Image: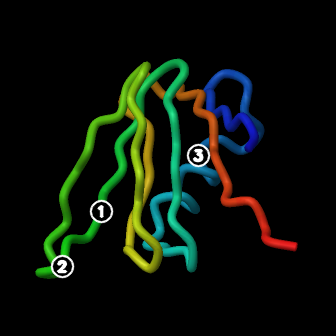
Amino acid sequence: EDIFTLDAETTANFRDKIDELFEESNHPEDQARMFIDGSAYYDVEDKNGDWVRILCEYGDLILIPAKTSFRFTTTPQNFVKMRKFFKEKEE
């Protein structure tokens, strides 16, 4: 796990980072994020190909299934801090 912070006032190249994160992406493994400060949006593509916008705020936990397309951006507050969880690799 690690902590991920995006802040318009302190993150270098903030706008470029936001543009990069808003590009459609997916991962081979399930994704879990817990929001510990600020807020952000996850846009997630449903099984019908429609995009659903999910507002994530302090205390929220979002799980994105493997191979599900998603995009990420901050709210107008331009600040979010979240804990990213990763599946442990089997030995």
Q: Is residue 29 left or right of residue 50?
A: right
- Front position among marks 1 and 3: 1
Circle 2/circle 3 CB separation < 8 Å: no
**Residue denoted by label 3:** 15
Q: Is residue 79 left or right of residue 91?
A: left
Give the residue displayed 54% in from the left and 50% down from the top: 18
Q: Earlier in the sequence, mark 2 or mark 3?
A: 3
Q: Quadrant of residue 43?
A: bottom left
Quadrant of the rendering where the N terminus is positioned = top right
Most distant residue in the front direction: 91
Residue name at image x 72 percent, y 33 percent: 11
Image position, residue 60 (x, y; %):
38, 29
* Mark 2 vs mark 1, CA separation in Å: 10 Å
Three-letter code, disc 1: Val
Q: Amino acid at mark 2?
A: Lys
Tell me if label 2 and label 1 are in contact, CB under 8 Å. no
Say the numbered circle drawn on residue 47.
Answer: 2
The answer to whether residue 56 is above or below residue 69 is above
Considering only vertical position in the picture, is 35 above or below 51? above
Up-down relation of residue 45 to residue 61 (above or below): below
Q: Which residue is mark 1?
A: 44
Mark 2–mark 3 distance (CA, rounded to whole Å): 30 Å
Instruction: Give how far apart the Cα atoms at labels 1 and 3 are.
Output: 21 Å
Q: Nearer the viewer, mark 2 or mark 3?
A: 2
